[in-house]
Amino acid sequence: MLTRIDHIGIACFDLDKTVEFYRATYGFEVFHSEINEEQGVREAMLKINETSDGGASYLQLLEPTREDSAVGKWLAKNGEGVHHIAFGTADVDGDAADIREKGVRVLYDEPRTGSMGSRITFLHPKDCHGVLTELVTSNPEH
Amino acid sequence: MLTRIDHIGIACFDLDKTVEFYRATYGFEVFHSEINEEQGVREAMLKINETSDGGASYLQLLEPTREDSAVGKWLAKNGEGVHHIAFGTADVDGDAADIREKGVRVLYDEPRTGSMGSRITFLHPKDCHGVLTELVTSNPEH
């Protein structure tokens, strides 16, 4: 069951400048940053609020580390903006299986590693009214 | 001060079909629906979680009521997808004034009426790294 908006993924050309925009304009601070080589992104997580399921909602700022990554190709086509939205669940495997049975394409056979050691998968935007949608189970150590 | 992700605004061609997609796929239910003539949209709010500032996070599904509305023009250009993101604040007037002083264009001189009697304004996406950004102060009666 999806119990929170986990994050909004925002693609940008320059992570440092975009982090500085969010800090200077709204006072949002970087909670965590990392490079995810598999996804081909350098990212910063800005925690905005905690959520009623014991988790939190973040902005995830994403800069591609290579042009042929999914985010790199998306940016080249669309420019900066909202790349995806993510819902949090305690059971990404079960929810992904349920959703696949309903006929929505799930992009990975098995969940992969997302921010802060989470396990993630994505749903095809064409099956979700144009919205690239991620499912996330947090790593309890974070 | 912005204290939560208030909602993600998603533009769609057919509100009823899109509501049904979110219900059937994820179990999300409509919390509130209304027509906002000023904004030229018919909308449904799906509450996803409550937030640590005493508010909540929603998906806001938006169908234009006329082609020349902002959302109607956006849909004609972009197709369905994430139209804007919104941050909640107790003081939309004060925050909008502060943000305007920092050089970010605020689209309304005074906040207008948003979902559920809230007061809202928007920031120019070109000043926000491509993200149309809304500020919301909820109506305490909702």
Image: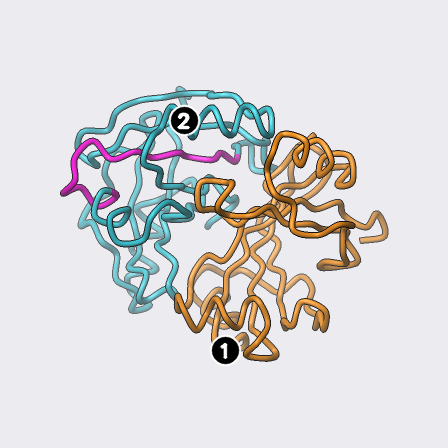
Chain colours: A cyan, B orange
Write the residue at 48% across / 70% down. Answer: B12
Task: Name the one closer to the observer, A96 or B6.
Answer: B6
**Which chain hosts label 2?**
A
Residue type at mark 2: give it.
Lys
What residue is disc 2 on?
A17
What residue is disc 1 on?
B14
Q: Which numbered marker is on residue A66? A: none
B43 left or right of A64?
right
Q: Position of residue B10 (x, y in %)?
A: 50, 60
Q: Are there few (<14), some (14-19), or many (20+) residues within 10 Å of tag 2? A: few
A42 left or right of A109?
right
What is the magenta range? A57-71
Q: Quadrant of residue A111?
A: top left
Q: Element at badge 2?
A: helix
Q: Position of residue A84 (x, y in %)?
A: 38, 49
Write the residue at 52% across / 32% down. Answer: A55
Write the residue at 48% across / 46% down. Answer: B126
Write the residue at 70% across / 46% down. Answer: B136
